[in-house]
Image: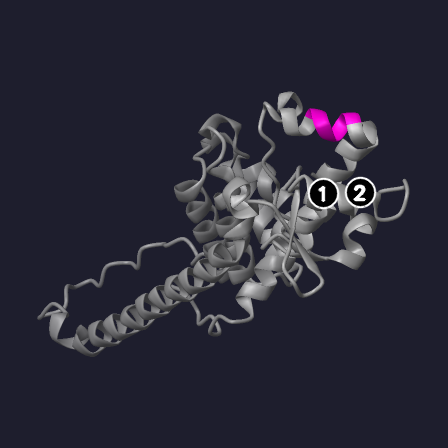
Amino acid sequence: MTAKARANLTPDIRLDTQFFNNLKTKRLQRSLGEHGVTCMIRLWCYVAERNPKGVISREDFEEAAGWTGEKEAFTSYAIRMRWADEDGFGNLAIHDWQLHQPYVFHSDKRKNAASVAAVTRWEKIRKQAIDADRMRSLCGSDAPALAPAPAPAPAPAPKRTKPNTSPRKERAQKIVSYYEQLIREDRPSRSRARKNVEKLLSKGIEPKVLWECVGLYSEDAQKNEPQYRKAAGNFFGRDAVYESYLEEAKRIAENLPPIEKVE
């Protein structure tokens, strides 16, 4: 699947390994040729992308399949042999679509669940930030009472401390850590991943958008063994896999509350 297709979060379809040996498929091939079999698979891909529930208008049926034979021949055969079912409203439903393509059929539920989970995650982060600010405020007000009395003489020289990490670096660190928790830990690419995320943040991509890119990729990554999942450095860098999820992540992020400064 191309990166452009993944940018729209196009679902993949599942094809049984015995599809070409199935008697129903063999009859299709004998009646309409190899072109008919190819058109059936092309039709499934089209429906999966445009309507995950497996319904398409009769008018678009042959056009979507790429059928070049006699008009209505492909449609009539599909209905007669129960590759598709009429719904009585001028539409055709792919036969047993929910049974054979459950991942596509329920994609709307996964997207809704991802949106709810995203809001929950960011609310938790916002609450942690508020609690941290409150704790610093309390500690600051108690500071005089905690000072040593009498003060030591001579006063000790102040310790040199490293400058505080910039907010951008902190956010990059949190995003990379989140990626490693969900998908795959890869220490060698960790530093490179942080730098790549910092570059993306400097280009104006919001942290919550990158966060959602990780969440969306995690759904697809679960299909593969850990060793075959992208390392964070490649996801945000060389392979730019995040781009495939960027548009959907932006749509999800639009429903999130604004991000406060995360300490």
From this viewpoint, which residue is outermost toward the bottom?
141
Residue shown at 72% from the left, 48% from the top: 46
Return the x and y of residue 253 as percentages of the image width and height. 54, 66
Q: Main secondary structure of the magenta part?
A: helix
Q: Quadrant of residue 182?
A: top left
Q: In this image, 66 relative to 139: left or right? A: right
Viewer-proximal residue among 149 and 47: 47
Which image quadrant: the C terminus?
bottom left
The residue labelled by disc 1 is 78
Amino acid type at image mark 2: Phe
Could you say which disc has been placed on residue 228 in the image? none
Q: Are marks 1 and 2 in contact (CB under 8 Å)?
A: yes
Which stretch did the figure color magenta? 26-30
Q: Which residue is mark 2?
A: 74
Residue found at the very far left of the displayed protein = 149
Tell me the amino acid under the disc marked 1.
Answer: Ala
Q: What residue lies at 45% left-to-right and 32% top-to-bottom?
A: 187
